[in-house]
Amino acid sequence: MLPIFNKINDSDQPLLIVNGKFTYQQDGLYSLHNADFLKEPKFKEAYAKGKATNSWKGDPAWRTYIACWLASQAIKLEGEFVECGVNKGGMPMTIMNYTPFKESGKTFYLLDTYGDLVDEQISESERELGIKKGSYEQDYLEEVKNTFANYPVKIIRGMVPQTLSEIDAEKISFLSIDMNVAKPEIEAIEYLWPRLSKGAFILLDDYGWEKHFHQKQEHDKLASKLGYEILSLPTGQGLIMKS
Ligand SMILES: C[S@@+](CC[C@H](N)C(=O)[O-])C[C@H]1O[C@@H](n2cnc3c(N)ncnc32)[C@H](O)[C@@H]1O
């Protein structure tokens, strides 16, 4: 049961009848706006490589495009790339093919249990919203190692926050956070925040998703504590820039 968000049609406004064809209708987002990035060869080729990792049940093209755009800015800054919550690596695979990552000399740190959520980190509120262990395969480390055999990555297996000390990067310019559970996400940002370069991005994958409302509440609290504002994106992502 998700009685949380105000819906336009909860009020007395009539349901919007759309006149015209959607340019995009997947992954919780329906749009009439320009989505020509879907046809750009550079994005299409990189996204196809991301999809080939078998990370996604759905088709998160717009989310992935946003990550690619941010990564193309972050690659010009001092610092490495980090993802906490990698699964089979669809996002880093797309990013490393969309940007000149190999030529940049950077390393992409990939942190995951490579075996599902951590039960004791799931709060009661999250359980009520349906977050539970069992959504991911039990051991996909070898698959991920094979997938990234020819890429400049450091694969770090284990539970965040315990594994954060294995990130030996002095500076970070891109941090992707996607662990589906608030506790390790908050701890990861608090731990890595001092190492983020000026202008670095943090991309929160789950920020606006109804099922992940508890994450939003915790990220909003952290934003007040650390002094930044989170941009809520129509894709369901949240964006932070370190100023
Ligand atoms: C939604 S998936 C990540 C999807 C990936 N970013 C993508 O776009 O394909 C969430 C991942 O977070 C991992 N995870 C959850 N809690 C974790 C923790 N405390 N430490 C490390 N990994 C964790 C899970 O094992 C799972 O692979």
Image (cartoon, rainbow, N blue to C red):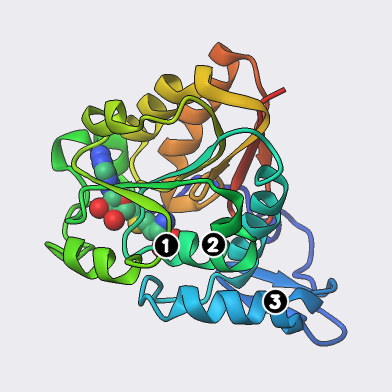
Vertically, is 37 above or below 85? below
Quarter of the image with the N terminus is bottom left
The answer to whether residue 235 is visible is no
Which residue is drawn at the image coordinates 40% and 28% (left, top)? 186
Q: Amino acid at mark 2?
A: Met
Marks 1 and 2 in Cβ contact (< 8 Å): yes
Q: Amino acid at mark 3?
A: Lys
Q: Position of residue 18 (x, y in %)?
A: 82, 79
Residue 96 marker: 2
Q: Earlier in the sequence, mark 2 or mark 3?
A: 3
- The residue that mark 3 highlights is 42
Q: Position of residue 2 (x, y in %)?
A: 42, 52
Q: Is residue 92 left or right of residue 235?
A: left
- The residue that mark 1 highlights is 151
Q: Residues within 10 Å of mark 2 (few under 14, many from 20)?
A: many
Comparing 83 with 228, the one in front is 83
Vertically, is 170 above or below 78? above
Comparing 192 with 31, the one in front is 192
Which residue is drawn at the image coordinates 75% and 70% (left, top)? 15
Q: Earlier in the sequence, mark 1 or mark 2?
A: 2
Q: Earlier in the sequence, mark 3 or mark 1?
A: 3
